Amino acid sequence: MSFLDKIKSKLPFTLDKEATDIGTSVNQLNEMASSDLNQASASDSTENVDDNKKFSFGDLLKKIKGGKKNSSTATGATLNEPLPGMKIYSGNSSAKSPLDQDSSVSNPLIESAIQGEVADMKQFLDLPEIDESLLNEIEPPKSILLYILKGVFLVFLIIGSGTYLFFATQLGTKLTFLTDVLHVPAAMNELKNTNDELKSAKTDLNVYNLLEGKFHLDNFSFEGDKFTRNYQIYTNKSVADSTRNTAKSEMTKIREILKSELIGARDKLLTDYHVTLVDPDVLDANMYPDIFKNLLIERIGSEIISREAKKDINETRDYKTYAQAKKLIENAELKNMLKTADIDTMTDKELVAFIIKLNGLAENELSAIQKIKDSKINWSAIIAEIKSQTRIVDQFFNEGLYDEAGGIQYTNYDFDAGTKRITITGTTKRYDSANFTTISDLIDQLNASPLFQGVEMKSFAKTGSAKDGYTATLRLSLQLQKDELSEEDSQLNIDSVPDFLAPQITTPVNN
Amino acid sequence: MLCLAVIAGTLALGYFKYSEYIVVKAAVIENQSYLETLKNSVADEKVEFQNSKTEYDKLVGEMEDGFKEVFPSSDNYTELTRSFDLLESKLNRVKDPFLISNIDYQEIQTSEDGTYKYLPLRMTISASNDNFTRFMQYIEESGSLSEKVRLMDIQSINLSLNDNGNDGVNTINFSIKINAYFQGNK
């Protein structure tokens, strides 16, 4: 179908070339057509409506041509003369046609004439067809605006396609073959590559930081072990003063080292282990800590695997170091301890507790040792406490004067770490027969000690005479308060051992 | 209309994609800049790490030596027995006696969490008051890597105080139950 055919098919009427040749203006024809139709519709009522809709310009031309033939052959009328049965009003547009007049004036005569004309018009419909192939030679009207629009459309189409291709290659990953072939760098690929490089470099840095943090922690544990030992010596009142003083000065030195190691561990382990990147695959920036943590775990894991089967001592050491370091990565409690700890404000006892707790969390070899040490009972300190409390009741206790002056003598101690129960067996000797008072004083005195509770002896018995003195058997049962032990130890002071000469709290011994 | 749609589409595509492109390019430039800094940091940290590791290896060596004595990988009871004999020879004096008359090793036990094992043993000792105290401190201070004494813990003590013997020295006879620790499987 040619362009012309397309246009023709779109038109609401059929176009005939002869229409132009005839010399009749289109306006005139239209007026004629409309007047005919009006007449037809007025007379034929509804059945003519469909016929009117089918009216075509070609039909009108047929009518004209038919009229021309008739006029030229039969009557010899000119073209401008009205066709038979038709009235053409040309030139003066203001003049009204008879049809228009019909609408306002009802004249039976005119109506009759119009009806006659309609009957004549029906005859025109049977005229022969016009050769429409002649229309093929007609070209569509040429428009500059249309050409401009076409040009703009094409330009923008090309620009749009180019833009899409450019950004698809730069920002997408599906057309990378194009950039590869053209050796053009793609922005998104560059971003991905630099992101990968950054991740790798940051993970390298994280590995070094983690291992160095572990070194500091292990140093802290090692020095902490020394500090704890010296603390035990310093707080044990059964140890000589000079030894305790040496232990104290050692503790002061070690405290500084511990402080330095703690700061080192804090710097290395609490530093930022991630960077925030521009990555279209990561929708939430809060995911980066986990991303870098997983990368670190993966890297440390590969280091562990590579050393698993090695027998070399250095490789074995490194294997242990990496394995223990891996546990630090997700140790939030340890990191929180490091963050909040301030050694300067800690007492010695608090520092020991901190060392023990940190060793437990650090999970190195020392942590197992520390766990055992933490459960140990300092029995010598307990024995010293029993003696100390006994001396408050008997100022000559353990001075070798029992036979002559009387007092308290222990013959047997039984300590059980499992039940934390202590049983003391002994005797009391009094020349005034107040043995039961002595025993009662001793029970009260031991109960007053924060180390013991539940000190009791429910059965009292004594024998003897005023001459040889009265003797009562002693069997005390004490429950150890382990939690109070370290607290008491820290307060113990050799100088605070009771004043043996204080008469108001000692049991008078009757000679 | 089609022309307008194409123009609008092209402009919209250009605007949005260009914005995205600018962000990506800026990120690339920033990445490249940060990468340089990071690589320098890694190089510095590597040097620091190597220095620290040298020191750390010394520490680990020292700790391992300590662990062999303090927290061995096996019960190592023969070494433990020798250490008791060594202590006895250090403490035992005529006027200040310390005599281990009996050592009885029992079955090896494992801790509940499997992190360590221990060898229970019973000892019967006769000692002066001072040596009794020294022995107690020896056990209590055990487990220090600096002193390298096998990690031990007193479970129970039963002691009797005697009057002066023939030599005029007060002695304490005591029976003591001790756990000697060593490394577990975990």
Image (cartoon, helix red, strand yellow):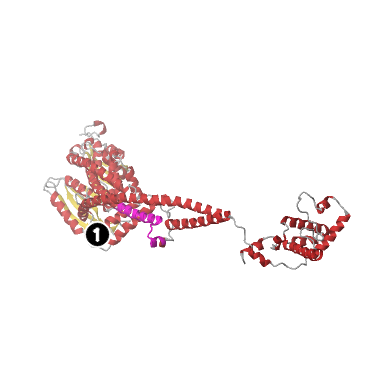
Q: Does the magenta stretch include residue A202?
A: yes
Magenta stretch? A178-207
In this rendering, the answer to whether B168 lies above or below A504 is below
Q: Name the residue under label 1.
A: A316
Residue at the (61%, 66%) spot, across then down = A2
10 Å neighbourhood of mark 1: few (<14), some, or many (≥20)?
Answer: some
Query: Residue A381: where, in percent of width, then height?
Result: 24, 43
Q: Which of A379 and A340 is in front in this view?
A: A340
Q: In which quarter of the image is the N terminus of chain A?
A: bottom right
- State the residue in front, A138 or B9: A138
Q: Whole-percent x and y of residue A423?
A: 28, 46
What type of secondary structure mainly makes up the magenta span?
A: helix
* The C terminus of chain A: image quadrant: top left
Q: In this view, does B167 lie above or below A391?
A: below
Residue A137 can be seen, yes or no: yes
Identify the secondary structure beneath mark 1: helix
| Quadrant in the rendering for residue A454 | top left
**Can residue A382 be spotted in the picture?**
no
Residue A341 is left or right of residue A46, and the answer is left
Nearest the viewer among B41 and B19 is B19
Q: In which quarter of the image is residue A133?
A: bottom right
Measured as percent of width and height from the top left, residue A253 is found at 21, 41
Whether the magenta-drawn stretch holds residue B99 is answered as no
Q: Which amino acid does label 1 sit on?
A: Thr
